[in-house]
Amino acid sequence: MYEPATRPTLYFIGVTTGRSSIMQVFPAWAEALGLVDAQIVGMDFPLHADPTAYRQAVQFIRDDPLSLGALVTTHKLDLFAACRELFDEIDPHARSMGETSCISKRDGRLVCHAKDPISAGLALDAFIPSGYFSRQPTELFCMGAGGSAIAITWHLTQAAKGADVPARIIVSNLDAPRLEHLRAFHRNIGVRVPVDYVLAATPVDNDRVLAQLSSGAVVINATGLGKDGPGSPLSPAAAFPRHAIAWELNYRGNLVFLEQARAQQQARHLKVEDGWIYFIHGWTQVIGEVFHLAIPTRGPRFDELSAIAAAARR
């Protein structure tokens, strides 16, 4: 089914990988990082693909010498469920969160990683000021209960945050099993803030949650809508809380949620972020793991890689 790699290869397991900027960015990064002859290859699967398809892909990567690893997006939970026993090693985040966002090889062993807790945390800390949640009771509303939601809620409730945690977290999803998976994860880690789990069958259900949020709330689109599927988790009538932070996890596609937030940005004094910095951290974390490189998360070298990515994206 898969052709053996003839060059050192990083795979991108997603839905519409050919549209991602990484296809232009990776060759430029490879040159800057000294990854001679390395290439990136997309593997596209439909949402909630047949577990056999995930297993075939992971077995191919495991058995092919020049297939060095993969970044997994969208399919993180489903791939982990289908392939868990194929991994020789599962890192602590992947084990507790039940997801695979990175596959690498180390000393002949196939390793499963969950990099989202690191990359999502770095992205959040880049635009949410330190002390933001401790200044006044402030909610977090995350639409989508997949791997990114798991990582985000874990990061924002760490003991090291002290009092700088959301007063309440609300997570919505149109799929009840995903909400139950997240609830079980929060129960296992003993999440220390109140969490509401909302089954949102329609955008209007999310609108109702949005209308109840206080000023300054953080509102996140982690559903994949706009990239992996059309539309927004909010209806056209949705109104953001004043002074809210709106974060669209994606940076490409028909990003309706991002457009909705930007349309209200001035009138409602919103801070609006797309997923570009998340993209940078997510990919550099995985490339460092797969190619066994130490890539910094800040400083001149990180800034250089960010500038290379921006130039290649254009």
Image (cartoon, rainbow, N blue to C red):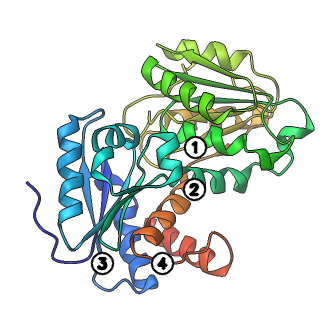
Q: Amino acid at mark 1?
A: Ala
In the image, residue 161 above or below residue 138: below
Mark 2 or 4, which is nearer the eye?
4
- Residue shown at 50% from the left, 21% from the top: 180
Residue under pointer 3? 38
Label 1 Cα crowd, 10 Å radius (few <14 / some 14-19 / many 20+):
many
Residue 119 bears which disc, if any?
Answer: 2
Q: Amino acid at mark 2?
A: Ser
Report the front residue among 250 and 152: 152
Residue under pointer 4? 293
Report the front residue among 294 and 81: 81
How far apart in space, not on screen, are marks 4 and 1 (Cα)? 23 Å
Is 20 left or right of 272, judged from the image as shown?
A: left
Q: Secondary structure under badge 2?
A: helix
- Residue shown at 59% from the left, 56% from the top: 118
- Residue shown at 67% from the left, 20% from the top: 210
How far apart in space, not on screen, are marks 2 and 4 (Cα)? 16 Å
Please indicate, yes or no, whether residue 194 appears anywhere in the rendered image.
yes
Label 4 Cα crowd, 10 Å radius (few <14 / some 14-19 / many 20+):
some
For the residues bearing labels 4 and 1, Cβ distance under 8 angstroms: no
In the image, residue 105 above or below residue 238: below
The answer to which of marks 3 and 1 sits earlier in the sequence is 3
Residue under pointer 1? 151
Label 2 Cα crowd, 10 Å radius (few <14 / some 14-19 / many 20+):
many
Q: Position of residue 275 (x, y in %)?
A: 55, 50
The answer to which of marks 3 and 4 sits earlier in the sequence is 3
